[in-house]
Image (cartoon, grey):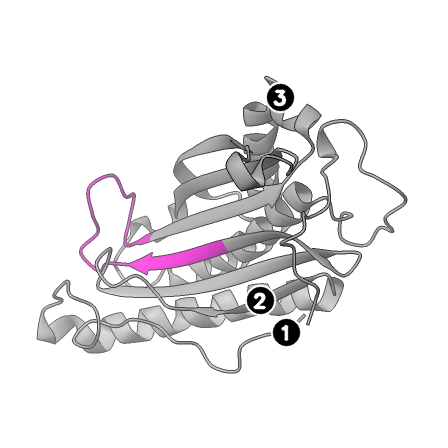
């Protein structure tokens, strides 16, 4: 797994467009730095157990919160790209409507799947359970989860009419670390565990969607049942 050397967060007073009162900057910076360290611990934990995922820094969104940091991930199966994902950490010292505290996590996962799997009416429930089961295991304090599961079918026409249909799975979700509901400065150690766990859970979600073996197991053939996915099409790229 390739990890970025240094984080590239968006901070208040810099690239972020939302404003934080000047008197809060120092305290907010410390809390956000602690959150970033927790994110790094989570991806280090994944790196110690997987060599089929590559993580790297990704440009953080500038308008969602005063502080933000993002990771991107690529999953590889048999040396071919099998799925991608994004994970965004948002921090607003003042909180936002719908948040339980000052932090919100946003994730996205996309993977090619077999046509049979894309047509399964239970795909949405199964895909959502990949996320919630992983969060229950690694970040059980999460709150107010929200998201969607989309099945994609791409068909070619004209000069592309000979190309077989491509089917894919996409999940978008967000949630709050419940431990982040207090702003007294004492809860950041608690929320750190939830943030580390969120990174691990996101990687497990991506691995499941991309047809990778569970951490610590060996892949034998195709995934059974709902866990089976097709390999990448002609546009899939090999691992670097």
Using the image as rendered, state which of residue 117 and residue 20 is in the foreground: 117
| Mark 2 vs mark 3, CA separation in Å | 30 Å
Residue at label 3?
119
Which residues, given as a range, are shown in magenta? 86-103
Quick check: is 58 in the magenta stretch? no
Q: Is residue 104 left or right of residue 206?
A: left
Extreme residue in the top direction? 121
Q: Nearer the viewer, mark 2 or mark 3?
A: 3
Which residue shows up at 22% across the image and 73% down it? 15
Q: Position of residue 11 (x, y in %)?
A: 25, 72
Residue 194 visible (yes or no): no
Residue at label 2?
55
Quick check: is 96 in the magenta stretch? yes
Q: Quadrant of the C terminus?
A: bottom right
Q: Position of residue 113 (x, y in %)?
A: 66, 37
Q: Secondary structure at mark 2?
A: strand
Q: Secondary structure at mark 1?
A: loop
Q: Quadrant of residue 23?
A: bottom left
Using the image as rendered, state which of residue 9 and residue 185 is in the foreground: 9
| Mark 2 vs mark 1, CA separation in Å | 6 Å
Residue at label 1?
2
Comes first in the chain, label 2 or label 3: 2
| Mark 1 vs mark 3, CA separation in Å | 34 Å
């Amino acid at each position: 797994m390739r990890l970025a050397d240094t984080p590239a967060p968006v901070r208040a007073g810099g690239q972020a467009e939302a404003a934080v009162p000047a008197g809060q900057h120092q305290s907010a910076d410390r809390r956000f730095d602690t959150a970033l360290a927790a994110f790094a611990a989570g991806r280090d934990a994944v790196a110690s157990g997987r060599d089929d995922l590559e993580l790297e820094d990704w440009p953080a969104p500038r308008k969602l919160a005063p502080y933000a940091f993002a990771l991107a991930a690529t999953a590889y199966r048999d040396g071919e790209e099998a799925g991608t994902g994004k994970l965004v950490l948002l921090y607003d010292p003042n909180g936002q409507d719908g948040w339980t505290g000052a932090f919100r996590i946003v994730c996205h996962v996309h993977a090619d799947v077999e046509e049979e799997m894309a047509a399964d009416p239970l795909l949405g429930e199964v895909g959502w359970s990949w996320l919630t089961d992983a969060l229950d295991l690694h970040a059980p304090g999460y709150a107010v989860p929200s998201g969607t599961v989309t099945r994609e079918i791409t068909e070619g026409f004209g000069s592309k009419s000979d190309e077989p249909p491509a089917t894919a799975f996409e999940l978008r979700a967000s949630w709050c670390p419940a431990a982040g509901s207090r702003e007294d400065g004492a809860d950041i150690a608690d929320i750190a565990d939830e943030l580390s766990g969120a990174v691990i859970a996101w990687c497990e979600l991506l691995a499941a969607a991309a047809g990778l073996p569970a951490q610590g197991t060996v892949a034998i053939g195709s995934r059974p049942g709902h866990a089976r996915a097709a390999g990448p099409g002609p546009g899939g790229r090999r691992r670097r």
